[in-house]
Image (tube, grey):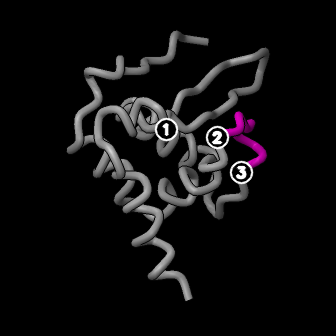
Amino acid sequence: MAALHHPAREQIRLVDVMHALGHPIRLGIVRALASGEETSCGAIDVPAPKSTLTTHWRVLRESGVIRQRPEGRRLYLTLRRDDLDARFPGLLDLVFAEDAELVP
């Protein structure tokens, strides 16, 4: 497996994070990771084909929202909450609160 690009904390840009969180499937993935626990890619129930999910995981990873860790043939995901809170304090709380208001 090729090396996965994860930007350093200081390289995370707000515009990239907002783009990543602006898609409903990616926001659902981030919500599933909000507990802070590492989760395998297959454990997240998202209504999309695997090839589409791969693209969403790449966007989230390259924007600095998640970290992917390969182990054998599996990828494990974690939300980079500490890095995002350090760069953009309160952003994830605001996004989650706004998203919760939209859900019936």
The secondary structure type at the circle numbered 1 is helix
**Image: magenta residue range:** 36-43
**At 35% from the left edge and 32% from the top edge, which residue is drawn?**
86
Which amino acid type corresponds to the residue marked 2 in the rendered image? Gly
Q: Residues within 10 Å of mark 2 (few under 14, many from 20)?
A: some
| Circles 1 and 2: CB atoms closer than 8 Å | yes
Q: Position of residue 31 (x, y in %)?
A: 57, 56
Q: Is the residue 24 above or below the residue 65 in the image? A: below
Q: Which disc number belongs to residue 33?
A: none
**At 38% from the left edge and 54% from the top edge, which residue is drawn?**
21
Q: Which disc number belongs to residue 36?
A: 2
Q: Residues within 10 Å of mark 1 (few under 14, many from 20)?
A: some
| Circles 2 and 3: CB atoms closer than 8 Å | no
Front residue (pair 38, 46):
38
Q: Is the residue 91 above or below the residue 8 in the image? A: below
**Alpha carbons under labels 2 and 3: distance apart:** 14 Å
The secondary structure type at the circle numbered 2 is loop
Which amino acid type corresponds to the residue marked 3 in the rendered image? Ile
> In the image, is 40 to the left or to the right of 35?
right
Which circle, 2 or 3, is nearer the viewer? 2
> In the image, is 83 to the left or to the right of 89?
right
**Alpha carbons under labels 1 and 3: distance apart:** 18 Å
> In the image, is 7 to the left or to the right of 44?
left
Which amino acid type corresponds to the residue marked 1 in the rendered image? Arg
**At 43% from the left edge and 57% from the top edge, which residue is drawn?**
93
Q: Residues within 10 Å of mark 3 (few under 14, many from 20)?
A: some
Q: Is the residue 2 above or below the residue 81 in the image? A: above
**Alpha carbons under labels 1 and 2: distance apart:** 8 Å
User: What residue is pinned by disc 3?
Assistant: 44
Q: Which disc number belongs to residue 81?
A: 1
